[in-house]
Image (spheres, coloured by chain):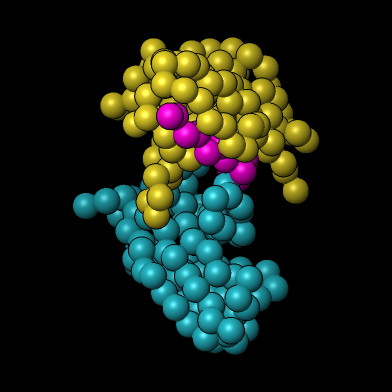
Chain colours: A yellow, B cyan
Amino acid sequence: GAVVSQHPSRVICKSGTSVKIECRSLDFQATTMFWYRQFPKQSLMLMATSNEGSKATYEQGVEKDKFLINHASLTLSTLTVTSAHPEDSSFYICSARGGSLSPLHFGNGTRLTVT
Amino acid sequence: QKEVEQDPGPLSVPEGAIVSLNCTYSNSAFQYFMWYRQYSRKGPELLMYTYSSGNKEDGRFTAQVDKSSKYISLFIRDSQPSDSATYLCAPVIQGAQKLVFGQGTRLTINP
């Protein structure tokens, strides 16, 4: 089946620093990738949608200058959390699909802890 | 009204029981339907997806869609402790970029 690889799986950083999370589709070309955030015992919250070669579309309430998304190729998207604060601590999950009729496949998530 | 409603549970059943997980949706434009399973601290994994009303079976799992009632179900037969996870439904509009997820139902299978 389709595989989406997300790295790192866990990261701890100090307040004020930036963290980059990578999401790769390993065996298919992902025309669209999505970034989600998930708090404990809650469902997935869509942060943004990125299409290869174009600017990401952010959901209402998500700061685009804080959560920088780059989708430079059909197999790689990155999320950079800039000037991280403790309230940014969360579980971030990426997903990818090959086309509008293709199912969505998820990475295994990145647990970010900002101290 | 939310686009997708799913009872968050928690749902706890004994091993071997038949489990029924359900979602309702309000948008008649939804055309196909996916179920994901999420273990703790992991990303969701696709379990099943179906395009039409009726049943689709895969091993111990059966996905059921009733478009007239806007009701979707996932049945798990002979449930195992390893089935303990959160199950999310996700109806999809063809051509739409975004998926809308249900809240997820936390399921525990007790040995």
Furthest toward the left, the residue is B1
Side of A75 where B86 appears, left or right: left
Name the residue located 57 percent from the left edge and 21 percent from the top edge.
Answer: A20
| Location of residue A6 in the rendering, given as x and y in whole percent from the top left corner | 64, 34
| Location of residue A106 in the rendering, given as x and y in whole percent from the top left corner | 60, 42
Decide: is A88 above or below B86. above
Name the residue located 68 percent from the left edge and 38 percent from the top edge.
Answer: A4
In depth, the one of B4 and B38 nearer the eye is B38
Residue B40 can be seen in this image: yes
Name the residue located 42 percent from the left edge and 64 percent from the top edge.
Answer: B105
Q: Is residue A113 magenta?
A: yes
| Location of residue B4 in the rendering, given as x and y in whole percent from the top left corner | 34, 54
| Location of residue A98 in the rendering, given as x and y in whole percent from the top left corner | 65, 34
Decide: is B86 above or below B91. below
Decide: is A33 above or below B56. above
Q: Is residue A82 magenta?
A: no
Residue B96 can be seen in this image: no
Quarter where residue A108 is shown: top right
Side of B43 where A3 appears, left or right: right
Side of A34 where A16 appears, left or right: left
Question: For the magenta stretch, what is the residue range?
Answer: A103-115
Total marks placed:
0
In depth, the one of A28 and B71 nearer the eye is A28
Furthest toward the right, the residue is A27
Name the residue located 34 percent from the left edge and 66 percent from the top edge.
Answer: B7
For the C terminus of chain A, the image quarter is top left
